[in-house]
Amino acid sequence: MSITLARTRAVYDISEVQGALDRSKGRSPELDAFYERMLDTGAERFLTTPSSTDALAPLAEECPNFDEVVGDLTRYLGLAHAGDAGINVMPILLLGDPGVGKTHFAKRLAKVLQTDCELISMNALSAGFVITGSSASWKGAKCGKVAERLVRGQYANPLLVLDEVEKASGSSQSDPLAALYQLLEPETARAFRDEFIDVEIDASQIFWVLTANSTEGIPAPLLNRMAVYDVPAPTPEQAAGIAQRIYGALLRELKLGKFPPQLGEAALARLAPVSPRDMRKTLLDALGYAVAAGRDEMGADDIRPKPGPGKARIGF
């Protein structure tokens, strides 16, 4: 059994916030309100660390094709315990085809670490202010995702996911990836300054997880700041295990106690090519077909994977 240990860490200087509020008083009601919130909530945030490397075992079971990532994280967690310090993990980049489970893995990792998770979709991001905030002198200005998560959240080490980072676009004046040169380096991230607020914030404990289909479009200096993992599609054996776990969870969730607890070989064979991302919906649909037919058992014919991209499909 593993519990989560939590100490606290100051993510900004209260006196610096008070000074910034005094200097800006009356210029921007939104900025004043943000400074006052920083003062009200205080500077201390939880810094979480699982008490045992066993905490990562469910993640290894649920996402078996991420075994290399989980293996490294387990060793880093062991180092944290050996030195009695917080887990120190460099930013990671998960590469893999769509559907292999990259985003799901990141969200589950945040749960294992018992911290907040912020997902930032980069495929439509054309400006860096989403991450770093915009100048308080601009109309409608506000802080970026980093400052917002550290100020409004409970944790000094939230997990921030930059999804499909290779699809971010911008100009030389507004590069959405520019802020990462500072934020992915712990030394410089300790003195991160959001464009909206005139206060340094310690962003060095953020756990960065970036996902991409390929490294094309990602600058080499950023790649050098990350541990890069090629995530394969699950093997047939791994896909079978994933399917069994999702199927069991659906039976419990839907209270379908009359259905067999295990999938048959024919059903597993039909599910083998289904991506982890689509597995739950495919099984949910299959259970629906079985119930509609008046059966208490799901057959292989009930499993009807949707067509791939480029073919007609219905989406919600």
Image (cartoon, helix red, strand yellow):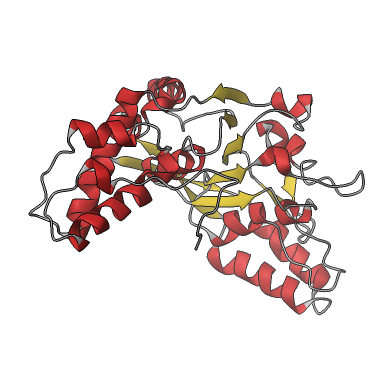
Give the percent coordinates (x, y) of residue 195.
80, 56
Q: Residue at position x 45%, y 20% from top?
A: 68
Q: Residue at position x 71%, y 22% from top?
A: 224
Give residue 214's quadrant in the image: top right
Residue 204 visible somewhere in the drawing: yes
Count of all numbered marks drawn on residues in the image:
0
Relative horizontal placement of residue 140, taking residue 115 as reference (left or right): right
Does 41 appear above or below 157?
A: below
Q: In terms of depth relative to the viewer, which is nearer, 295 or 8?
A: 295
Q: In terms of depth relative to the viewer, which is nearer, 16 or 51?
A: 51
Instruction: Spot the residue most to the right.
Output: 173
Give residue 274's quadrant in the image: top left
Residue 13 visible somewhere in the drawing: no
Give the percent coordinates (x, y) of residue 94.
56, 31
Quick one: quadrant of the N terminus?
top left
Give the percent coordinates (x, y) of residue 301.
26, 44
Give the percent coordinates (x, y) of residue 71.
41, 20
Q: Residue at position x 35%, y 40% from top?
A: 5
Relative horizontal placement of residue 231, taking residue 84 as reference (left or right): right
Q: Residue at position x 47%, y 31% from top?
A: 87
Does 95 appear above or below 284?
A: above
